[in-house]
Amino acid sequence: MDFREAVRADLPAIVALLADDVIGSTRDAAAVDEAYERAFEAVTADPRNQLIVADDGGEVVATLQVTYIPGLGRHGAERALVESVRVRADRRGNGVGAALMAWVVAAARLRGCALVQLTTDKRRTDARRFYERLGFVASHEGMKRDL
């Protein structure tokens, strides 16, 4: 399995991964539309963002987005923010997600980031256990406001 930056041809598979989820199905469409096209172009054009896919023999089986955030805190350290982690349903439990997360942690370390952070919806109890197994700690209470 290869981990690589997504290309335009991967967009339908990525969108399908986002929608194939109990929570994602309520906020993501199953088909690519203009909004996804614009977002893909914006993310891939931004040097502080990477849209990564796990490619297994030409099939996209997982994805995540990582954003590198500069900051003054932690003595001017950069941090990696991981979002939209998804593994195809038939590949869950087979180590794909753990390998993808190991890849992003290594990439952040190589870049000199001081930490890797992510949020997970409180309803995603399996995801929380997964991240805890990988060494992530629920150290903060996240807050959001829909606009």
Image (cartoon, helix red, strand yellow):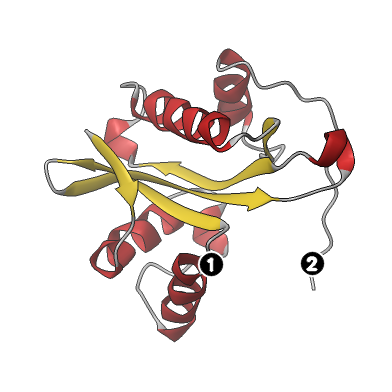
The residue sitting at 63% across, 49% down in the picture is 68
Above or below 82: residue 28: below
Q: Quadrant where the N terminus lies?
A: top left
Residue 139 at least partly seen: yes
Where, by quadrant of the figure, is residue 6 drawn? Answer: bottom left
Name the amino acid, label 2.
Answer: Asp
41 and 96: which is toward the camera: 41
Closer to the eye: label 1 or 2: 1
Q: Quadrant where the C terminus lies?
A: bottom right
Mark 2, secondary structure of its residue: loop
Going by the image, does 71 lie left or right of 108?
Answer: right
Q: Mark 2 points at which residue?
A: 146
Q: Which mark is residue 18?
A: none
Q: Earlier in the sequence, mark 1 or mark 2?
A: 1
Where, by quadrant of the figure, is residue 48 drawn? Answer: bottom right
Residue 23 in percent (x, y) is at 57, 51
Name the amino acid, label 1.
Answer: Asp
What distance separates the C-alpha of mark 1 from that of mark 2? 24 Å
Taking the view exactly as shown, the residue that stands out farthest to the left is 57
Q: Residue 46 carries which label?
A: 1
Crowding at mark 2 (Cα within 10 Å: few <14, some 14-19, many 20+):
few
Above or below 104: residue 85: below
Taking the view exactly as shown, the residue that stands out farthest to the bottom is 34
Residue 141 at least partly seen: no
33 and 139: which is toward the camera: 139
Above or below 147: residue 140: above
The residue sitting at 49% across, 58% down in the picture is 25
Residue 72 in percent (x, y) is at 87, 46
Where, by quadrant of the figure, is residue 133 drawn? Answer: top right
